[in-house]
Image (tube, grey):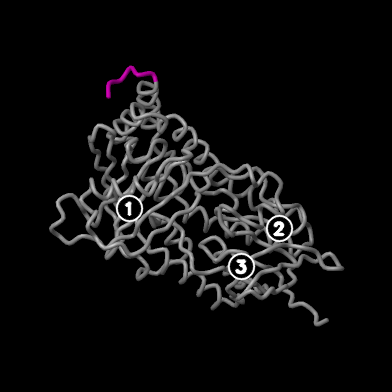
Amino acid sequence: MAALETFDVAVIGGGPSGATAATDLARAGRSVLLLDRGGRIKPCGGAIPPRLIKDFEIPAHLLVAHISTARMIAPSGSQVDIPIKGGFVGMVDREVFDEWLRERAEHAGAVRRTGTFECLSCDSDGTTVVQYQVNQKRVRVRARSVIGADGANSGVARQAIPGAEKMRYVFAYHEIVRSPGNGAPDFDGKRCDVIYQGQFSPDFYSWVFPHGATTSIGVGSAQKGFQIRKSVAALREKAGLDLLDTVRREGAPIPLKPLRKWDNGRDVVLAGDAAGVVAPASGEGIYYAMAGGRFAAEAVEKFLATGDARSLALARKRFMRAHGQVFWILDIMQRYWYSTDGRRERFVKICRDRDVQQLTFDAYMNKELVRAKPLAHVRIFFKNLGHLSGLLPT
C-alpha cells in the first residue's frame, strides 16, 4: 500500500478559529492540512470589534457596515440607545469573511481541502490518522497533531475529549434579508437592535443587525420545543421587515460555556465553538474563536517543537487567563437577567446608566475588563445590587 500523506498539523474546520490556527502554523513553517466541509455558513450577527480588526489584520474591504449605536429594547417596549463613542463595531458577512480567512491560510502555505471529517485512528507507529470523505470517497492522512475547530457538534471533540458531550447550547437561527431602503420607518443601517422580549426569545434575545446591503434578523433560545422559525417570522413582521427578500436562512447550536478540557493529553486540541468559546449573555463568538485558534496554534507549535504533549493544555490555560473572568461574569448575567421578562426590564434599565455603557463598550472594544475608573466600578456595583434586590424601580 502507498504511504499515507503526512502533515505536522491537521486542522479540522475552516471557520474563523480553524483558519486562524492554520494561517499561524503555516506561517511558522509547519505543514498544515486545513479541512473544511464547505457549503455551510454559521448563523451569526457578524459583529467584530476593533481589537479583532487590529490583532488579526482584517482589511477594511471586508467590513460591510460600521455600527455607531446599539439599541436595547425591553419587554415593555422601552428603548435604550447606547452610542459607541470614539470608535465603531465592524460588521462582516460570514460567507465572504470566512472564505477570505481560508484563502489567507492557503496563501500562507496551508493545504486546503474540502471534505467531511469522519474519524480519528492510529497508524502502526502511533501517529494519528485522520479519515474524511470527499464525493463518497474515503481519504486518509497522517497528522502529528490535530486541531478540532469543527463547530459546536465537533466530531473531533466527541471522539477525543472526555466530557465534550456535556457542552451547554443556545440554538440560534437567523434570516439574511435585503436591507430596506431609506424610507423604512424604524431601521438604521448604523444601529444594531438587541431585543429582550420573551415573545421572541424566552431565555436569550433576538436581534436585527445591519450588514450593509443585507440584514441579519435572528433569535437565540435554549428552550426545547421553542418554535424559533416562527419567532423570527413574528419579529420580522413586528419590525416591518417581513416583506423584504430573503437571501438565505441558517441555524445552528451555539455553545455558551467553555469545556473543562480542550486536549486529549496526546496530540489533539480544540478551538473555537468546538471548545465552547462563545461569550455567554452576548453570544459573541468571532473574536473569541480567532483568539482560541491562535492559542491552539501556539500550543501545537510548542508541542511539535518539544514533543511534550503537556504543551497542548496551554491553549485553554492562556485563553482562560485572558478571557475567563469575562466569561464568568457574562454567564452569571445570563443566568439571572435573562430568566424572566421582569428581570430583563431591570437589565435594560441598568443599561441606561452612563457608567455601565462606557465600561461595557470599553470592555467590548478592547476585549478586557477595564480598571481605569475604580469609582465607576463602585457605582455600578451598588446600582446593580439595587436592581438585583428590587430596591431600584424599573
Instruction: Decide if residue 163 is on the left or right side of residue 368.
Output: right
Q: Which segment is the magenta one? A: 389-394
Residue 35 vs 217, above or below: the answer is below
Instruction: Decide if residue 390 is on the left or right side of residue 78.
Output: right
Q: Which residue is mark 1?
A: 217
The three-letter code of the residue at mark 2 reads Val
Q: Position of residue 329 (x, y in %)?
A: 48, 35
Residue 208 vs 212, above or below: the answer is above
- Res 116 label: 3
- Res 268 label: 2
Q: Are marks 3 and 2 in contact (CB under 8 Å)?
A: no
| Badge 2: residue crowd in 10 Å (few <14, some 14–19, many ≥20) | many
Give me the C-alpha separation between circle 3 and circle 2: 18 Å
In the rendered image, the quadrant that contains the N terminus is bottom right
The three-letter code of the residue at mark 1 reads Ile
Please name the residue shown 52% across and 55% down the image.
289
Instruction: Decide if residue 366 is on the left or right side of residue 350.
Output: right
Residue that sits furthest to the left in the current view: 183
Please name the residue shown 37% across and 68% down the image.
62
Q: Position of residue 109 (x, y in %)?
A: 60, 78
Please name the residue shown 79% across and 62% down the image.
307
First of labels 1, 2 by sequence position? 1
| Badge 1: residue crowd in 10 Å (few <14, some 14–19, many ≥20) | many
Q: Nearer the viewer, residue 175 or 266?
A: 175
Tell me which secondary structure the magenta stretch mostly adopts: loop
The three-letter code of the residue at mark 3 reads Thr
Regarding mark 3 in the picture, which secondary structure is present there? strand
| Badge 3: residue crowd in 10 Å (few <14, some 14–19, many ≥20) | many
Residue 262 vs 298, above or below: the answer is above
Please name the residue shown 29% across and 63% down the image.
214
Q: Nearer the viewer, mark 1 or mark 2?
A: 1
First of labels 3, 2 by sequence position? 3
